[in-house]
Image (cartoon, rainbow, N blue to C red):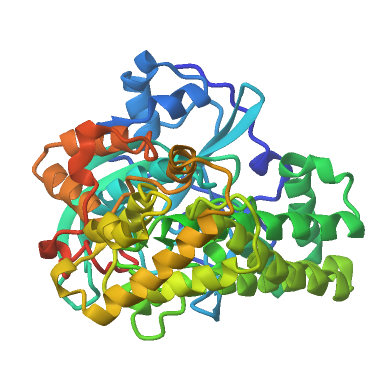
């Protein structure tokens, strides 16, 4: 197995002088060298041939002993030095100080087809940043990360990727709901892949410590490898960098809102400097449309990271990044201007996104009211977001009397739709129909357009949980089925029609299907 290794992060940025793998505060360093824990009996459950190809490997390589050894952490690839990154962050709005890669170990960087990829093992053992943790991961959280990162990519959402999912052969102790009932679970390791895993928190660490020399080195490195189009490092370039990160962050969140994805733990250490969705923990997709929903048990009381608040949290997190970059620019106004622009752009892009979900190509002033009235209707009775928008594409112009019937399958309690609710929907369909009369697309063209925007299939928590339950018994067929399904989430795929369905009632309050903890 041959890889084109080209490490830059460890070669160009300062390392921790202490090579002991002991938990500690690390100063004046971007990373600490650390070796993965050798698993007792690693087994490959699944590998992404698409990602293997992206880093220059073939199907034969993915089935080799070398692949198993390297991506389980059993062996270290020749002439490379695994490491854990140092970063800090704000967690649930509070400054948390030094955090770092507590259960992720970066292996190396690969360049293939003029693209740079960093490869990282999640669940490969403790690091100096593990704090009270053991650095390990369990099978359930690893399946969720592996399936979700690939599903997100094929939904067209900026994301980190996954190369492989392996069992470690070791049992891991976890208190799934933080209620004192710890139990042993199967340990697993996911190999994550991204151009870089640098987060907002990497910059916050050095700014908080007033280590501006290393702050500048990190910013310059980021520009050199990931934003070279911005030009040579300077104050003007740093402002441009912040503007680009703000744009990418907003675009990512608009995509989340489009498909009903809720990240669950949008701390600044979980925000990618490339605007990628990163760190798949207690995430979920909206089942019933609900601005106030969050899948994270830790956030149940305050709901800081609820669906409807994600764009605001993106802005808040960008403000923390602006504070971190400020010492290199020493002017507040450029940052304030970009943050203000984010708010303006959110309104514009959000409206554009909702228009596309409704199959509207032409801009019309009345669209804001049409969308607001729709959101009001969606909240009248529990209505499945994914099913609703997909079914809406079947609506035929001039047929508003049958509008409610078109979307009936999206209601969780269709027999309980009151007369008042039905009337409100009829009023909306009448407005929608009048609005469609201004469009030039035929019903068939509109349907095709809407179906490219509104996925038919999303990774609902209960689906992931079914795959987890089977995997616990040693059956991996569902992982493979879902992995294949989510390669084409916008296609009809009639052979998978059973997955185009509302969350079953048994899953409403089942652990792993409705609410999850950060240990997930």
Residue found 22% across the figure and 62% down from its top = 512
Q: Quadrant of residue 339?
A: bottom right
Left/right of residue 98 with respect to residue 386 in the rendered view? right
x, y percent for residue 369 = 55, 73
Q: Residue at x 31, y 76 (%)?
A: 423
Q: Is residue 300 visible?
A: yes
Seen in the image, is 447 located left or right of residue 188? right
- Is residue 277 visible in the rendered image? The answer is no
- Relative to 273, does residue 153 appear above or below in the rendering? above
User: 30 left or right of 190?
Assistant: right
The x and y percentages for residue 287 are 29, 63
> Residue 489 location in percent, x, y?
37, 40
Name the quadrant of the N terminus.
Answer: top left
The residue positioned 31% from the left and 53% from the top of the image is 137
Furthest-front residue in this view: 398
Residue that appears at 35% across and 68% down: 289
Query: Is 204 on the left-hand or right-hand side of 38?
Result: right
Quarter occupied by the C terminus: bottom left
Q: Residue furthest top?
A: 60
Please provide percent x and percent y for residue 378: 36, 71
- Above-or-below relation of 477 to 131: above
In the image, 238 versus 406, the foreground residue is 406
- On screen, residue 210 above or below 222: below
């Amino acid at each position: 197995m041959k890889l084109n290794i080209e490490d830059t992060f460890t070669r160009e940025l300062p390392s921790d002088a202490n090579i002991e793998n002991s938990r500690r505060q690390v100063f004046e360093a971007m990373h600490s060298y650390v070796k993965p824990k050798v698993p007792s009996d690693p087994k490959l459950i699944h590998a992404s041939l698409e990602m293997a190809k992206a880093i220059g490997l073939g199907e034969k390589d993915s089935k080799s002993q070398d692949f198993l050894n390297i991506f389980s952490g059993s062996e270290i690839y020749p002439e490379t030095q695994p490491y854990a990154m140092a970063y800090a962050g704000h967690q649930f709005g509070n400054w948390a100080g030094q955090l770092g890669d507590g259960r992720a170990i970066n292996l190396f960087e690969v360049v293939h087809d003029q693209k740079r990829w960093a490869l990282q093992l999640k669940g490969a053992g403790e690091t100096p940043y593990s704090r009270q943790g053991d650095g390990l991961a369990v099978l359930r959280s690893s399946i969720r990360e592996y399936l979700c990162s690939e599903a997100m990519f094929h939904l067209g959402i900026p994301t980190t990727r996954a190369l492989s999912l392996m069992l470690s052969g070791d049992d891991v102790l976890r208190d799934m709901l933080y209620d004192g009932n710890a139990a042993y679970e199967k340990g697993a390791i996911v190999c994550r892949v991204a151009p870089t895993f640098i987060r907002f928190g990497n910059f916050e660490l050095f700014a908080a410590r007033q280590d501006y020399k290393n702050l500048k080195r990190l910013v310059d490195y980021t520009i050199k490898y990931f934003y070279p189009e911005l030009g040579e490092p300077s104050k003007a370039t740093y402002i441009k960098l912040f503007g680009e990160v703000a744009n990418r962050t907003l675009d990512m969140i608009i995509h989340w809102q489009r498909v009903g994805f809720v990240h669950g733990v949008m701390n600044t250490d979980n925000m990618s400097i490339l605007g990628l969705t990163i760190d798949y923990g207690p995430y979920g997709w909206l089942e019933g449309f609900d601005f106030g929903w969050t899948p994270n048990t830790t956030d149940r009381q305050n709901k800081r990271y609820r669906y409807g608040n994600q764009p605001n949290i993106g802005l808040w997190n960008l403000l923390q990044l602006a504070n971190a970059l400020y010492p290199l620019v020493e002017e507040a106004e450029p940052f304030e201007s970009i943050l203000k622009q984010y708010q303006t752009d959110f309104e514009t892009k959000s409206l554009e996104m909702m228009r596309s979900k409704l199959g509207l190509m032409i801009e019309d002033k009345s669209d804001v009211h049409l969308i607001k009235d729709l959101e009001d209707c969606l909240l009248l009775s529990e209505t499945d977001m994914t099913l609703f928008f997909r079914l809406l594409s079947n609506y035929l112009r001039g047929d508003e009397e049958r509008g409610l019937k078109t979307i009936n399958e999206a209601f969780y309690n269709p027999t309980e739709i009151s007369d008042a609710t039905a009337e409100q929907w009829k009023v909306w369909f009448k407005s929608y129909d009048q609005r469609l009369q201004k469009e030039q697309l035929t019903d068939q063209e509109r349907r095709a357009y809407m179906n490219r925007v509104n996925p038919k299939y999303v990774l609902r928590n209960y689906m992931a949980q079914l795959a987890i339950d089977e995997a616990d018994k040693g059956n991996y067929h569902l992982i493979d089925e879902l992995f294949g399904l989510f390669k084409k989430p916008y296609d009809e795929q009639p052979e998978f029609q059973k997955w185009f369905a509302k969350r079953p009632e048994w899953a409403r309050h089942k652990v792993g299907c409705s609410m999850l903890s950060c240990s997930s």
